[in-house]
Structure formats: structure tokens, C-alpha cells
Image (cartoon, helix red, strand yellow):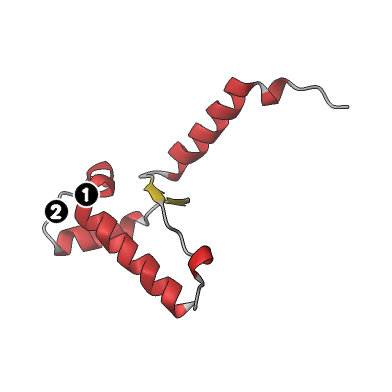
Amino acid sequence: MGIIVPEETVLFEWARENGLELCIVKLCLNSQVKKLILEDMEQQAKAGDLKGFEKVNKYFIVCKLFLFFALIFFRTNERGFNNQKPN
């Protein structure tokens, strides 16, 4: 499973060239963007001569890096990991 946070400047430049709205959230949900990212990942995998088990089969696009870390932080707090006492 891969977590992908696209570079906004690159994504906006591509969106301008393709006449798409410059909204990071909408772009991350756009099927053309998902296809573009998948093609780029496949190209990078071929260039790196990656084996099948080294390639990302499933991925999730997150529009902001902060959102990803916030999800992890809050999920960890829900489980009570932050309340454990050291041994």
C-alpha cells in the first residue's frame, strides 16, 4: 500500500496544460490524475528494475501531507498508545 502526496506545483502545471480546475482536492480525485500517477509509478518501477513484490499495487492519494500525519496521530491517540507508561 502506498500513500502518495502529489507535488502541488507539478500537478497545477499539468492541470493548466490540460484545462482542469486548480483545486488540489478535486485534482487528487480526478481519474486522469490517478492514471497519470499510476503511469509515472510504472515508469519509475521499470527504470529501477523493480521486481513484482517491490512495486506498489494499491495506493491512496492524499492532497496534503498534513492530513496524512493527522490521520495517523488521531488514530494512534484513539488506541491509547500515547497514555502508556514507560517500563
- SS assignment at label 1: loop
Q: Label 1 is placed on what type of residue?
A: Asn
x, y percent for residue 7: 37, 57
Q: Which is nearer the N-term, disc 1 or disc 2? A: 2
Q: Nearer the viewer, residue 61 or 19?
A: 61
The Cα–Cα distance between marks 1 and 2, rounded to whole angstroms, is 10 Å
Left or right: residue 73 compared with residue 17: right
Left or right: residue 86 compared with residue 18: right
Tell me the residue that label 2 is attached to.
20
Q: Nearer the viewer, residue 16 or 59?
A: 59
| Vertical placement of residue 37 versus 87, above or below | below
Count numbered badges in the picture. Answer: 2
- SS assignment at label 2: loop
The structure residue drawn at horizontal position 20% and vertical position 57%, both measured from the top left corner, is: 32
Which residue is outermost to the front? 52
| Vertical placement of residue 76 versus 62, above or below | above
x, y percent for residue 17: 15, 64
Which residue is outermost to the right? 87
Q: How would you rate the neighbour count of disc 2 (Cα within 10 Å): few for under 14, some for 14-19, many for 20 or more?
A: some
Left or right: residue 78 compared with residue 55: right
x, y percent for residue 64: 40, 43
Q: Label 2 is placed on what type of residue?
A: Leu
Q: How would you rate the neighbour count of disc 1 (Cα within 10 Å): few for under 14, some for 14-19, many for 20 or more?
A: few
Answer yes or no: do the residues labelled 1 and 2 have beta carbons within 8 Å? yes
